[in-house]
Amino acid sequence: MVVSTTEPTRRFLQTWVPLLAIFVLIVAEHVPLGGDWLTSMDIGFVFVPMFFLARYSEGPVAPIAILLLGVFKDITSETPIGFWSFLFCVFFILALGQRQLLYNAAFNTVWVTFGFLCFLIYAVFYVAAVLSLSVAPSFGATMLGALLTVLAFPLFNVAFDWLSQDDHPHGAY
Amino acid sequence: MAGFGARKGEKRLLTGTGIAFICALLALLLLFVLPKNDPLIVDLRQKSFDVLMPVFQLVAWPFEQMREAGENMTELMDLREQNAALLVENQLLRENIETLIRDSALLSQYRQLLSMPIETDAKVIGARVVADLRSPFVKTLVVNRGQADGVALGQAVMGGRGLVGRVISVGARSSRVLLATDLNSHIPVVTLSGNVRAILSGRNESQPMLTFLPRKAEMQNAETIITSGDGGEMPIGLPVGKLALDEKGTPFVQLHDDLDQLVHVRLVLSESVPDVSTPVRGR
């Protein structure tokens, strides 16, 4: 589906739709669904819209909003304030670094890059949890969370794909 | 390198990556500077849940509808079997009623003989779980009852069949419940038949363990565990679960309720719970 939008509208949507998606996903994580296996790991679906945001958004809103959404996740998930915000910012910086590489890249390249960043940030998550929370989460469950996030990427990407059509972000951010 | 939204020939002091770096540093600063269990942070969390409760309910609505539809289908399919099981259960309960009436009469007579004060019945209110905050680090829930309903810190929270946790923070319209499986949960309990006192301690796993057991404690497998009421936060005798031993011989408690399936809970508004929110005034 190609959405005919003017440039400012497209820019607005490319920033605010992923941010709204991140907010909804943070809230949705806490919907009581039942199932202990769901709670034994952190599935980071929020990283998908964040990855999109890093690739396409412009302006200072995105990184600041990422920090604030991180604080919001810290509040709702009862982790120390700064834990998720730091991880979100690190992921955002890493994804920003891939902006030029992913310019006009094939879907598989984008997916592999996301997968690499995702496993990297989950490794940082594990280390940060051990250092700052003094609780060692299961390493297997952590990596399984990363794997599920990577596997879910194509599904979420479909939803965001229409926002980036005919859009060619250039160069450095 | 051109910065945020920089037009041709225009330079900005900070690039997007630069701002993101500053944000990351700020987050790191927050992580190491802010105290983890500061009352202000706890209050902020609770207030956030009060504000966010309608959002949680809105997001949960489609999931709840799907779950209810699934449950309705299953219930319809199992109606015959359920009816038969309920008839048997009803018969057993009828038989027990007579025994209970007799025991109750005897108990009140014994109390009178011993001049023991009769404990007032704790008031129980129902609540719905609006947010499940369980993660690898914490095991907490948010329920839709708060100060306005008489909820206070430390009150016991029951599932359909037994204790599941206690209230750790109270807002105007919502409360946070620390589940008995959380690492920070410690509840005084006692075995029903052996009268062995212990602490029910969470370990961030599916079942809590028993700690601070007496050295020569004699306990039987599948023994019933109830709250001891020590510390005065919880009433005596709330059912908790059954005693079991793991492969290493460590005693743990098989809770009566499945914590994964909690949709509704009951809050025990016992009067003995101290009101921490009210400051003590000096004379």
Image (tube, rainbow, N blue to C red):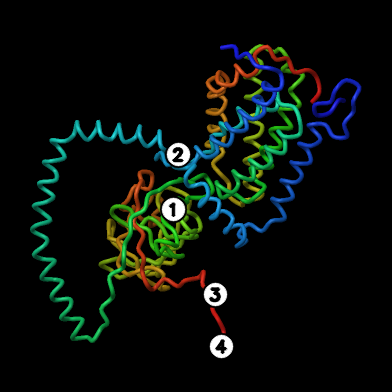
Q: Chain of mark 4?
A: B
Say which residue appears at 55% left-offset and 47% top-offset.
A76
Q: Which residue is mark 4?
A: B283
Give the Cα distance between marks 4 and 1: 41 Å
| For marks 3 and 1 on the same chain, the one whose residue lies earlier in the sequence | 1
Tag shown at residue B279: 3
List x then y, in percent, for residue B252. Answer: 38, 55
Callout 3 and callout 1 share a chain: yes
Q: Which residue is mark 2?
A: B58
Tag shown at residue B255: none
B25 to the left or right of B113: right
Tag 4 secondary structure: loop
Q: Quadrant of residue A84?
A: top right
Say which residue appears at 32% left-offset and 70% top-offset.
B236
Q: Nearer the viewer, mark 4 or mark 1?
A: 4
Give the Cα distance between marks 4 and 3: 13 Å
Estimate how packed mark 4 is, as few (under 14), some (14 to 19) or many (20 or more) residues with alpha carbons within 10 Å: few
Q: Nearer the viewer, mark 2 or mark 3?
A: 2
Q: Which residue is mark 1?
A: B181
Callout 4 and callout 2 share a chain: yes
B62 to the left or right of A80: left
Q: Nearer the viewer, mark 1 or mark 2?
A: 2
Give the Cα distance between marks 4 and 2: 48 Å
Tag 1 secondary structure: loop
Question: Quick check: marks 2 and 3 in contact, CB under 8 Å?
Answer: no
Tag 3 secondary structure: loop
